[in-house]
Amino acid sequence: MTANFHIKTFSDYRLFFDAIRANKPDIILLDLMLPMIEGTEVLKYVKSNLLMHNIPVIVVSGLINEKEKVMCLDLGADDYISKPFGFNELVSRINAVLRRFGVKDVLKYDNIEVDV
């Protein structure tokens, strides 16, 4: 299986927040184990922000207890995948979430839309 995603990674949550304010992504893969901030705090911020709340979020974590999974889903995560996982599973979960959110390859400029 191949995937044709444009990916950006961030080592600092402040850079991440600046980037998604400037250019809204189609989906966020969020690891819970982050430096400087808890991943759940990032999830809460994204899901409570009016400009970001409708961005789908898949939580990625090495924590596999049910309580953690339920908490993230209750906070608004759209899926939860436990490490380790395979590439094909990750791509399938991303595609499934994007289908639910109706994300398509659409280019927009002013009043013109092109469905790629």
Image: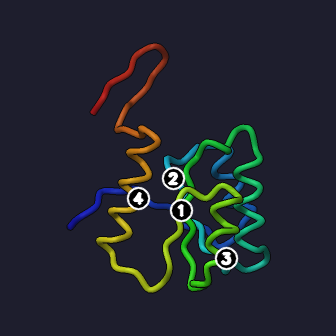
Q: Earlier in the sequence, mark 1 or mark 3?
A: 1
Q: Do labels 1 and 4 touch, CB within 8 Å?
A: yes
Give the camera-side residue of 83 and 6. Answer: 83
Q: Do labels 2 and 3 touch, CB within 8 Å?
A: no
Disc 4: which residue:
94
Q: Earlier in the sequence, mark 1 or mark 4?
A: 1
Residue displayed at 76% across by 74% down: 38
Q: Residues within 10 Å of mark 3 (few under 14, many from 20)?
A: some
- The amino acid pointed to by label 4 is Ile
Residue displayed at 54% across by 73% down: 60
In terms of secondary structure, where does tag 2 sit?
Answer: loop
Q: Do labels 2 and 4 touch, CB within 8 Å?
A: yes
Q: Do labels 1 and 3 touch, CB within 8 Å?
A: no
Could you tell me which quadrant the N terminus lies in? bottom left
- The amino acid pointed to by label 1 is Ile
Q: Do labels 2 and 1 touch, CB within 8 Å?
A: yes
Q: Earlier in the sequence, mark 2 or mark 3?
A: 2
Say how many tags the image has: 4
- Mark whose residue sits in front, 2 or 1: 1
Disc 2: which residue:
27
Q: Earlier in the sequence, mark 4 or mark 3?
A: 3
Q: Which of the 4 quarters of the picture holds residue 78?
A: bottom right
Disc 3: which residue:
68
Disc 1: which residue:
58
- What is the x, y in percent for residue 73? 63, 62
- The amino acid pointed to by label 2 is Ile
Gap between marks 1 and 4, in whole Å? 8 Å
